[in-house]
Image (cartoon, rainbow, N blue to C red):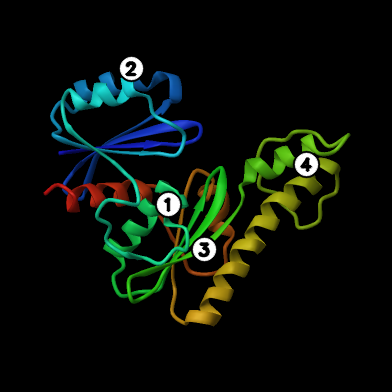
Amino acid sequence: MNLIIDVGNTFIKLAVFSEDKLIEKVNSERDDFLQALEKLSKEVPHWDHCIVSSVGGFSEKELSALKKNATVLELSHKINLPFRNTYATPTTLGVDRIALISAAAHQFPKKNVLVIDAGSCITYDFLNSENEYLGGAIAPGIEMRYKAMHYFTANLPLLKTEVPEKLIGDSTNNSMHVGVIQGVIYELEGFINAYIEKFGNLTVILTGGDAHFLRDSIKNDIFANSNFLLEGLNYILEINKD
């Protein structure tokens, strides 16, 4: 079995896969990783391979804890990947984006795929039908937009995410919710339509922590998959075992 570790900016996700099947998944605060690992090891005690994808830093102590029970692969652009990377600056391509495109290459071969990850930032990543990664876009995420309006103005409050019920905000708070959520929806639909116009048939994957705020409001056909990044990491680990 495979142990998958996804180290984000705020949380760490731990998952166990048996071949392509997700067996167990745990979310952990950054400071609670070792406790979460110990708990998971009691529930699913046997794994022999592990992959670590880190955008937020991962300590040697935490790596050592993993290496006690498994062969550990650290994700980078240098390892074997299931797509051809044409990104102009491959050393700066985030490991989270690498994992998402790997999942797209594995699950949707010979298709044009746009992966939208709605997290701390909203990333757009495009894999064409020739299995070439062309790049994409990075935009502020939902929480970041709320924080920007609060911290860069004198009077606007810091709000928690809320899906507006109406298109026209009838108060300052409601206007902010409309501006953030509806603005993101228009942005997503604009990108999707632009890719369809340029490339024709398009498979769209929506994932990330804020996907649930957006999926029901997008008019285009999409596949929502909260585990898409984990599935990509698992596939990368599988093809690098030898």
Q: How far apart are the alpha carbons under marks 3 and 2?
A: 37 Å
Residue 1: x %, y % from top left? 15, 39
Q: Amino acid at mark 3?
A: Gly
Q: What amino acid is found at the position of numbered circle 2 in the picture?
A: Gln
Q: Quadrant of residue 167?
A: bottom right
Please state if 11 lies on the left or on the right of 4 as rendered. Answer: right
Q: CA distance from mark 1 to mark 2?
A: 32 Å
> x, y (%) of residue 8?
45, 36
Q: Residue at x 16, y 48 (%)?
A: 19
Residue beneath disc 2: 35
Q: Residue at x 39, y 29 (%)?
A: 58
Q: CA distance from mark 4 to mark 1?
A: 32 Å
Q: What amino acid type should be assigned to the residue bearing mark 4?
A: Met
Question: Which of disc 1 and disc 4 is earlier in sequence?
Answer: 1
Q: Quickly name the residue at label 4.
A: 149
Q: Earlier in the sequence, mark 2 or mark 4?
A: 2
Alpha carbon distance from label 1 to label 3:
15 Å
Between disc 1 and disc 2, the foreground one is 1
Q: Which is in the foreground here, disc 1 or disc 3?
A: 1
Residue at disc 4, secondary structure: helix
Asked if the residue at tag 2 contacts the one at tag 3, i.e. Cβ–Cβ closer than 8 Å, the answer is no
Mark 1: which amino acid?
A: Thr
Marks 3, 2: nearer the viewer? 3
Viewer-proximal residue among 42 and 66: 66
Element on which disc 3 rests: strand
Residue 136 numbered tag: 3
Left/right placement of residue 227 relative to residue 175 reads left
